[in-house]
């Protein structure tokens, strides 16, 4: 860490968190607590396509309410999976964080450790496991995207009297278009220093406004609030 661009300050990321303080990464407690801890965190659980779809497909209301609780437990370990490999790579991989090679960049901490310590056979197995996890995540998000675009947008607002075959065909087209768009955004993400900056920027543009919209729908009244509520918080029985 001392050899990285942050140098000694990188070991004191929690210092200077007061408003107008000299935090080395430019953070303060207001943005951390209310921006990241409240708005973006609650926004994730209330507007994430994959998570909301799992709740909407539950067999009853009790199961739907348990969905975020069950899903949140394994996510408690995500910070460890993110931080610990990076710290290990800084200590064990030569030139990590300071070199110019792709494998020495911060986003490649886990692949760098794998390449450093795993033999060829285990390396292939580990890469297969990584690809499988990526495919599972992509499949969940593609399925959720397909459902939202086809049923919540296209069927509700554009054409609500078509046959099931028509919606299936439209869903296939929407899936292909969505994947092509996501491939294009990968080139945008490549221009950022690290993937976390890009993800937080997307959350700020999309999750936070959608969280405010869904909150207004749940707590407000009137035609606009009712329409938003039906769009974002439709009960499972309403989908059939």
Image (spheres, rainbow, N blue to C red):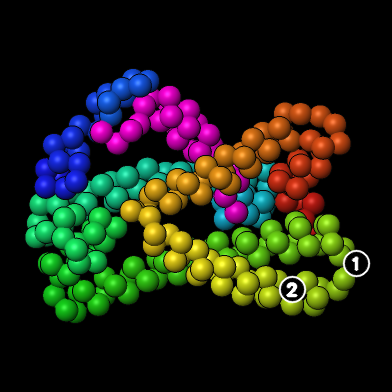
Q: Secondary structure at mark 2?
A: helix
Q: Secondary structure at mark 1?
A: loop
| Residue sitting nearer the eye, 59 or 141 | 141
Q: Is residue 71 above or below residue 158?
A: above
Q: Nearer the viewer, mark 2 or mark 1?
A: 2
Q: Position of residue 186 (x, y in %)?
A: 45, 65
Q: Position of residue 121 (x, y in %)?
A: 19, 79
Q: Is residue 82 above or below residue 133?
A: above
Whether residue 199 appears in this view of the structure is yes
Name the quadrant of the C terminus.
bottom right
Q: Position of residue 90 (x, y in %)?
A: 14, 52
Residue for badge 2? 170
Question: Magenta span covers which residues?
Answer: 24-49
Q: Main secondary structure of the magenta part?
A: helix
Whether residue 63 appears in this view of the structure is no
Residue drawn 16% across and 48% down? 4
Residue for badge 1? 161
> Is 214 inside the magenta-drawn segment?
no
Dividing the picture into quarters, in which one does residue 1 lie? Answer: top left
């Amino acid at each position: 860490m001392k050899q990285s661009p942050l140098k000694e300050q990188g070991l004191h990321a929690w210092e200077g968190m007061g408003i107008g303080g000299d935090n080395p990464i430019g953070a303060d407690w207001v943005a951390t607590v209310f921006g990241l801890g409240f708005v973006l965190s609650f926004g994730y659980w209330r507007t994430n396509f994959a998570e909301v779809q799992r709740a909407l497909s539950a067999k009853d209301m009790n199961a739907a309410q348990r969905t975020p609780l069950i899903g949140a437990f394994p996510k408690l370990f995500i910070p460890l999976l993110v931080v610990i490999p990076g710290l290990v790579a800084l200590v064990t991989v030569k030139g990590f964080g300071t070199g110019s090679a792709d494998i020495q960049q911060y986003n490649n901490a886990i692949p760098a450790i794998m390449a450093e310590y795993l033999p060829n056979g285990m390396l292939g197995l580990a890469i297969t496991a990584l690809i499988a996890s990526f495919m599972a995540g992509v499949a969940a998000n593609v399925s959720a995207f397909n459902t939202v675009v086809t049923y919540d947008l296209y069927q509700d607002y554009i054409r609500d009297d078509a046959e099931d075959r028509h919606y299936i065909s439209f869903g296939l087209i929407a899936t292909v278009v969505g994947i092509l768009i996501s491939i294009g955004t990968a080139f945008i993400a490549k221009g950022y220093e690290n993937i976390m900056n890009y993800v937080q920027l997307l959350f700020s543009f999309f999750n936070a406004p959608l969280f405010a919209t869904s909150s207004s729908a749940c707590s407000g009244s009137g035609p606009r609030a009712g329409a938003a509520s039906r769009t974002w918080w439709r009960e499972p029985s309403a989908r059939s």
